[in-house]
Structure formats: C-alpha cells, structure tokens
Image: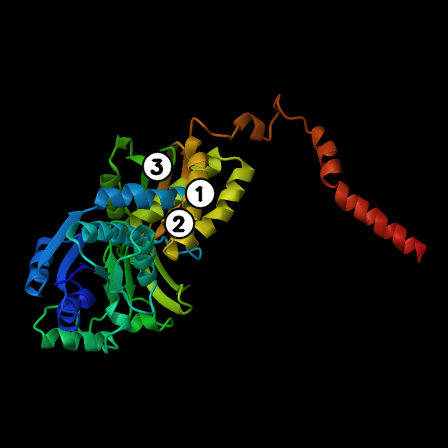
Amino acid sequence: MAKVVLAYSGGLDTSIIIPWLKENYGYEVIAFCANVGQGEDLEPIREKALRSGASKVYVEDLVEEFVTDYVFPVLKAGAVYEKKYLLGTSIARPLIAKRMVEIAEQEGATAICHGATGKGNDQVRFELTVKAFNPSLKVIAPWREWTISSREEAIDYAMAHGIEVPVTKEKIYSCDQNLWHISHEGGDLEDPWNEPQDHLYTLTVPPEEAPDQPVYIVIGFHSGIPTSLNGQEMGPVQLLTELNRLGGANGVGIVSMVENRLVGMKSRGVYETPGGTILFVAHDELERLTLDRRTLQMKEQLASKYAELVYDGNWFSTLKQALDAFVDVTQQTVSGEVKVKLYKGSCAAVAARSPYSLYDEELATFGADEIFSHKDAEGFINLFGLPLKVRALMDKKRAGEK
C-alpha cells in the first residue's frame, strides 16, 4: 500500500482528509502534527488521528526552531506584508513542509497532502517547499479535488463519518495559531464592513478592557535578536511567550485587514500578534539608533520585497537567501536596549540606547559644540542645490532667447 504524509492539525479540514484519502486513493495515511507553539496539548490530536484512520502519527516539538530560524529572520528583516501583516502563518508553513518531506523520505512515502484550499496562500507555501527539497513527491490537495465546496459541507462530511471537529456551523471561523500569532478568517469577517467582535480574540484582550495604567518594559537585543526582558536573559521561546502575555494583557497587536492574496483575490483577516508587535516596534527603534541613513533606507525598501517573498512561499529561494545575507550584515551593530510603553492597544518605543549608537548628543544639540560649524552649511547647500540652480539659470536663459 502506498503511503502519504498528511499535514495534520486536528481541525476541520485535516480531520476529514484522513478518511477521504483512504476512500479515494487507498493510501496508508501517516499524519504529521507540528508543535509550533499553538498552545494546546497535542496528545489528544495524536489519538484523534489514529481514531480517524491514520496508521501512524508523528507529533514533534518544533517551537524553538520555529522562533530561532523562522521568526527571528523575519524580525531582523523588518518584513511586514502590505504594511500590516507580520507573516505569522506564512513563516510556519515552510518549516512544517520541510519536515514533512523528511518524514516522507524516512517512511518511503510517495506523496504528501495538505488541507489548504485552492483559494488560499498556504497551498503555494507547502508545495514550493516540497519542490525545493524533493520535487519527485506527489502533492495531494483535496480542496482542489473533492466535491465538498464549503466548510458547512465539510462539517456534514465529518458528522457522517463520526469525526469530531472543533467548529460548528454557528462558529465557523478558520483559525491558525502558533507562538507568533493567531489568525481568524471566515464567518462574519468575510464582510469587511463587519467590525471584529470581542469574543473573537484569543491572545489579546480588547483594548478597552486593558488596564488603565501603562506598562513599561525593556527589551535587550544582540545583533538584531532579542535576548532579554527587563534585564533578565531569556531563551527565544520563553521571551516570546512572556511578551505575548504582556502584550495580550494590554490589548496590543490586533490587526484587521483586507489583504491581497497571491492567487489574485482579496481576503479579510483578523490577526493577533501581541509579542511580535512589541518586538517589531522595539527592533525598528534600535535600528534607527544604530544604522546610517542609506543603510536604513535600503533595508526599508528590501523589507517589502522580503515580506512578499515570504508571503508567497519563497522561503527557500535564492533571492530570499541573498536578502538574508544582506540583513545579517546590517544587524551586526543592532545591539542594545529599548524601552517600550504598552497602553490600551498602543505599543510605542519611548527610549533606546546602544553601544553602537550613531547618535551624538553633542553634535545634535542646539547649543554650542566643537564638532559642527554652522558656517559649513552654506557651502553644503550651495553644492547640494547646484542642479536646481543650474536648471533655473538655463530656464531663464532660454526664456530670454525667445
């Protein structure tokens, strides 16, 4: 019997895929569930996969690898998709797919399977990763094949096969959670005129319910990577977990947006990224202190391209690797501390310091200093404005010749 490795979460789609694969392909199904910090006990998911018909289940803890090798590179790059989305789902899929390929090779499987829809971005992220590591593997995407056309019909299929699923026709949001964020789509959110309801939030309290007093925290960085909180050294998982708690308690990190999917349509999603929002704000402030103007400007331009590559599933592309090399060079001096103020949904960097700071108080002061001569500005402006002066003179000359 041929084997297939299924990316399994225990959610609606992947729960019904196991019997569907057996009925339609006759495959032996090996389920793979990755712990990327979704905050739930995965042992029941293992048991559920076996009850649903899987012959074998892999449940693996990939949280630290996820934060270190996927979250932190995006943070260092300053990559934000369409100015709002911190790429939470986008960065987890390449890690999961890469491990699926390794399991497929280990088990002698000939195919992998995912539960992404034909309208979504995840299908591309899974499949580009497979192509990057083992293009001979067959990819099965049931949402592009079966006759099920809606989540309501998927629920009916699950009920007919005696499979418990974590959604109902009344609460039909599609959610994806890891240690970086949680996303919400579907249901009433599909109408962009509908404001997200407070009951939706999982990691974050509504800003109106956050404490009435601000909370100040200090985050330490070394070469662009966060390493401490309030002076206490922490590992990557512990640090992000604590920032999620602090940010969530203060209503930080809620984003509602209409985004442009890779497949050509717009979709509406609500994201909660409390710890990630704090880290992005702090990291950005430290870069402003430690990077020169041209480097900072170029990095901001490339950050948009970096975000697009990640969003589009090109994590293992040559261009992404080249941009990583550029980013790593820029981060050599991004070390220091940033003080961040959290208050009712807002997150602001209010102070920063670094041994590599390019800010010179004596040079920046409005008082007297020994470095800068105000008289030098006249020559600088004359040279800097020379092209404008020449153009004006030539325009005047041409006007006089008419």
Residue 360 vs residue 237: left or right?
right
Residue 317: image tag: 2
In this orientation, which residue lies closer to the viewer: 396 or 353?
A: 396
Which tag is nearer the camera, tag 1 or tag 3? 1
Q: How many angstroms separate mark 3 from mark 2 (CA)? A: 23 Å
Q: How many angstroms separate mark 1 from mark 3 (CA)? A: 19 Å
Question: Image point 15% across, 52% down: which residue?
Answer: 107
Helix, strand or loop under label 3: strand
Residue 209 position (above or below residue 334): below
Residue ranking furthest to the right: 401
Which amino acid type is marked by label 1?
Ala
Residue 186 vs residue 391: left or right?
left
Q: Earlier in the sequence, mark 2 or mark 1?
A: 2
Question: Image point 51% across, 30% down: which residue?
Answer: 358
Q: Earlier in the sequence, mark 1 or mark 3?
A: 3
Q: Is there CB contact under 8 Å for labels 2 and 1?
A: no
Q: How many angstroms separate mark 2 from mark 1 (CA)? A: 9 Å
The residue that label 3 is drawn on is: 225
Which amino acid type is marked by label 3?
Ile
